[in-house]
Image (cartoon, rainbow, N blue to C red):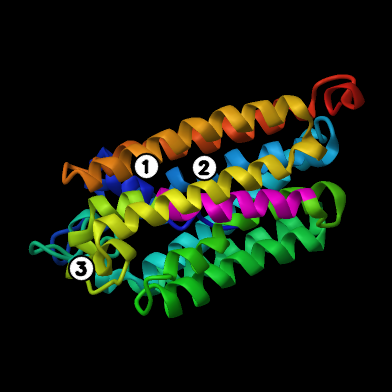
Amino acid sequence: MTQQVTDAPAGRAPTADAAAVAGLAPGARRSVGVVARALFLLTKPRIIELLLVTTLPTMFLAKRGVPSLALIAVTLVGGALAAGSANTLNCFLDRDIDAIMRRTSRRPLVAGHGQSATIKPGEALASGVLLGAAATLLLGLLANWLAAGLADAAILFYVFVYTMVLKRRTASNIVIGGAAGCFPVLVGWAAVTGTVSWPAVVLFAVIFFWTPPHFWALAMKFKDDYASAGVPMLPVVATAKTVARKIVLYSYGMVVVTLALTPYAGWVYGACALGLGGWFLVEAHRLQSRVAAGESAAPMRLFHLSIAYLTLLFAAVAITAILPWHGFWRG
């Protein structure tokens, strides 16, 4: 289980904690609290929150009810540790470009403005590896080894395929690499059932199609940052019209996939998916219209809406999964 491949928190102003650990005067001593806060920030906790939003409803759907609280706790904690591992290793590998990009220049591994980095690279690497090992053992021993293996696969995919191979080489980086952020639903399903069946694959596909519109909206806002770092995100190498067109196409694909879950999740879920999908498509078309008219694209509107959309969609998954009389609700 790993992050949805966006740096969503970077779209916001740095928090007080981020400012507190952004850098130290050369030779300054680091307190345990400062180091701990810095390592915590390297895990990108706000992104982990979004991953857990997709994991828990998937567990409800797999169980057709509420799993044991112990299994929920193990899966969510194990998933958070795995995501934190992947995000920390991502920060370790991307510390050179993070120093160039304005929105990431205050991360704890970055030095600048006469200050030393709060965290040393070796410390970040060790933290990332230890978090991954802890996630594996927790999920494997207290859930099952399939869930643990899927969490490990997500870490490896995000670190080696996305961060090390795709991100700096191709504009398709987020399309392919975004698959890393789809693993939480597989982990949640496997933790409950010990298998991966087709509803879990459909939920995987939902997040797969959701990721490009979500991330490209953010990348449109910060394309100059990516350009300065030499990262070929789609908005850097393609026109705004091309980006907007692809956002619309992937949005339609996402909505179609969400509806494919209806035969299993039920018509109540299907109605929710249809309404939420229409809401998303309206905003995607608005962005395309603004770009076509030569107006400000205002892409962060779609970015923030995409987070709300995913949260509400998976809330619908959870609620319909625990409704009584499942056969009736499935029609």
The location of residue 271, given as percent across then percent down, is 67, 26
Marks 2/3: CA–CA distance:
27 Å
Which of disc 1 and disc 3 is earlier in sequence? 3
Question: What's the residue type where badge 3 is placed?
Answer: Ala
The location of residue 270, given as percent across then percent down, is 70, 31
* Residue pictured at 66% horizontal, 61% vertical: 151
Which of disc 2 and disc 1 is earlier in sequence? 2
Question: What's the residue type where badge 2 is placed?
Answer: Leu
Residue that label 1 marks: 303
Which of disc 3 and disc 2 is earlier in sequence? 2
Question: What's the residue type where badge 1 is placed?
Answer: Phe
The location of residue 101, given as percent across then percent down, is 20, 62
Residue that label 2 marks: 50
Marks 1/2: CA–CA distance:
13 Å
* Residue pictured at 57% horizontal, 27% vertical: 275
Q: Is residue 114 above or below residue 266?
A: below
Q: Residues within 10 Å of mark 2 (few under 14, many from 20)?
A: some
Q: Is residue 315 above or below residue 28?
A: above
